[in-house]
Image: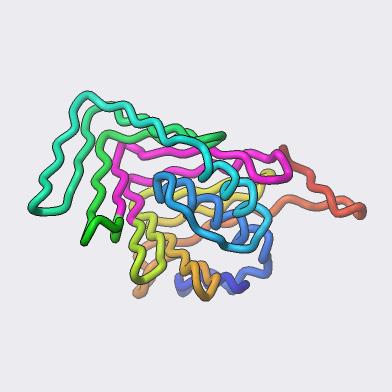
Amino acid sequence: MQITATSPHASRARSPRLAGRVVGVAIGLAIGLPMGLGSAPALAAQADRNQPVKVQADKKVTKYQEGTSVYTGDVVIDQGSLHATGQRATLYLEDGELVRAVLEGRPATFRERDEEGNWVEGEALQADYRTAEGTVVLTDEAWLKRSGDEIRSDRITYDLATEVVEAGEEGGKSRVEMTLQPRNKEGGNGGD
């Protein structure tokens, strides 16, 4: 797994642990989509995928001919330990298959436990999951945290196939901020 910071002021990060945490974010913000990702956070999140998805919103509009379902107004999505909130969730379907899910809010948030029992938390003004590309893009005030490790940027992209996380933007419009907590010798962490 590789983490790449594209801000000209940030260096390549050396923590595959934090990149693995993004898997939980990807799954959480994908609004209950089944994915076998083969990492610790994914395993717990995968167990959550076997739970029913509960969606609450002030309004839901499904346009069958367009293949969209839009939930608006204090959207709350729960599945297992996953709890996600936003002002709007839009699901795009083609031939009955989900091809894209977008969660928006001020901010859109999520929280989910990984298999180690740690909370994986994140937020952004928009989270965009595209199944064909296998990517999750968090944009505008994006933030991820697990076990005290944090990454902040205006844009965080996670490629599920290559397990590459990119944070920042070309041209250095924003900076990438990372906080990595020290780990003890037994492999535990100094966080949650």
Give the image's coloring scheme: rainbow
Q: Which residue of the protein is positioned furthest toward the top in this rendering?
A: 58
Residue at the image point whose x is 46% and y is 39% from the top: 110
Is residue 137 shown left or right of residue 36?
A: left
The percent position of residue 95, horizontal first and vertical second, equals 21, 61
Residue at the image point whose x is 63% and y is 63% from the top: 38
Q: Nearer the viewer, residue 64 or 78?
A: 64
Q: Nearer the viewer, residue 141 or 99?
A: 99
Q: Which residue of the protein is positioned furthest toward the right in this rendering?
A: 185
Check the image and report above or below for 50 versus 40: above
Instruction: Assign the magenta stretch its main secondary structure.
Output: strand
Q: Which residues are magenta?
A: 101-128
Residue 119 among those drawn in magenta: yes
The percent position of residue 61, horizontal first and vertical second, equals 14, 36
Q: Which residue of the protein is positioned furthest toward the left in this rendering?
A: 65
Residue 72 among those drawn in magenta: no
The percent position of residue 74, horizontal first and vertical second, equals 29, 27
The percent position of residue 16, horizontal first and vertical second, equals 66, 66
Residue at the image point whose x is 29% and y is 50% from the top: 102
The quarter of the displayed image where residue 108 is located: top left
Quarter of the image where the N terminus is located: bottom right
Is residue 122 shown left or right of residue 183?
A: left
Residue at the image point whose x is 69% and y is 44% from the top: 147
Check the image and report above or below for 21 versus 10: above
Check the image and report above or below for 148 versus 19: above
